[in-house]
Image (cartoon, helix red, strand yellow):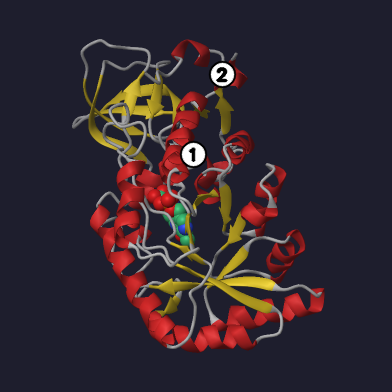
Amino acid sequence: MYNLPAEKFQGIKTPFYYYNTRLLQDTLDAVKAQTGKRPGYHVHYAVKACAHPDVLRMIQEAGLGADCVSGGEIQASLDAGFPADRIVYAGVGKSDWEIELGLQAGIRYFNVESVAELEVINEIAARMNRTANISFRINPDVGAHTHANITTGLAENKFGIAMDLMETVIRKAQEMSHTTFVGLHFHIGSQILEMDDFVALAHRINELQDRLEAQGIGPVPHINVGGGLGIDYEQPDEHPIPDFEAYFQTYEKYLKLRPGQELHFELGRAIVCQCGSLITRCLYVKQTEHKQFVIVDAGMTDLIRPALYGALHRIENLSSREAGQPYDVVGPICESSDVFACQYNLPATRRGHLLAIRSAGAYGQIMASQYNCRPLPKGYLDKDLE
Ligand code: LLP
């Protein structure tokens, strides 16, 4: 249904990213269909997943907000036309210039992760004669069934403020001259497919809200549950659009929102992952005593997820359907971990064939590096290939 237009890839220098805008639009429509029937639900797209300017613009035009983790992301969001009051800003280490940029632009709120940061934001806001809206990122100590490198809500992680310290920190923010306490923020991890993990988070939030209210704090104007909804890396064509209904229904059923309270989400991967592919060319097929390698011109510098998390992305040969065999698909970088897949069944593959590494729209192009003095991969939308 969302076929890769292989014929249009011929003249383009590989490796490059291709984004299917029809799939992106259908995904955005699917999100809006769900949030549209649940008043107070708002999605701020997690810009860290993919900040291609045209992709950002489409997301902005669909009416989503932006969840940023750096000054660069705030700037990219403003440039893509996101209104400042739909931009939120998180991160454990905000530099002064980034805080200033957020205040100058008038973003909706800062997700604050420590008392030290709260104090600095208050100071800078005072100096600029502004008031900063503060939402606290709370570490809910909830595990998620995902890769250890991408769980974030456990007590041992660096993120957020411990539940037990909440009352003290909130009182502190309320007493400060240039901060207004407006919300509670959570995020338990990424690539989460078990709705029970989100149920566990909802229960923790309910407990916390009850506890805070018993102490006369709140209810706060917003609850922000972060992102984390996963996608199907194995069968992207069977599941091009994540099950947003199940996701939003989970929160609707288990999270006890207070009257008038808004619920904010920060989905990244679920929105952009399936629409992007990394297109690469086979340089050589190398036979060794033990196996056959397909050496492609994309490497871990273009897509680091396999090397960093052991992630497996589906790989397709766009130039051949001939019966093939298992290959190790590897890149040209001088690192043994520059491997996309081991003993992976592909059609008979030869020099010059185009390969697509699928589900690469999220945390693909944006995590590319110039290691080995390689140029950064470009990203094209369908319109760029007409
Ligand atoms: N909100 C916060 C506070 C986050 O830390 C993240 C992701 C998100 C939202 C968006 O999460 P998503 O909906 O995309 O799961 N590079 C890794 C993923 C790192 C995610 C970091 N935080 C990967 O390639 O799997």
Q: Is mark 1 within 8 Å of ligand 1?
A: no
Residue 373 image position (x, y, % from top left): 59, 42
Residue that numbered label 1 is attached to: 302
Q: Nearer the viewer, residue 92 or 29?
A: 29
How would you rate the neighbour count of disc 1 (Cα within 10 Å): few for under 14, some for 14-19, many for 20 or more?
Answer: many
Residue 142 image position (x, y, % from top left): 30, 69
Residue 364 image position (x, y, % from top left): 47, 41
Residue 326 image position (x, y, % from top left): 21, 26
Q: Element at badge 1?
A: loop
Ligand 1 falls in which quarter? bottom left
Chain-order first, disc 1 or disc 2? 2
Give the image quarter of residue 123.
bottom right
Which amino acid, mark 2?
Answer: Ile
Answer above or below: position of 42 versus 324.
below
Q: Nearer the viewer, residue 192 or 171?
A: 171
248 relative to 14 in the view: left or right: left
Q: Which label was assigned to residue 12?
A: 2
Q: Element at badge 2?
A: loop
Q: Residue at horizontal 62%, vertical 53%?
A: 86
Q: Which of 145 and 184 is in front in this view?
A: 184
Q: Residue at horizontal 66%, vertical 69%?
A: 95
Outermost residue, front direction?
Answer: 259
How would you rate the neighbour count of disc 2 (Cα within 10 Å): few for under 14, some for 14-19, many for 20 or more?
Answer: few
182 relative to 200 in the view: left or right: right
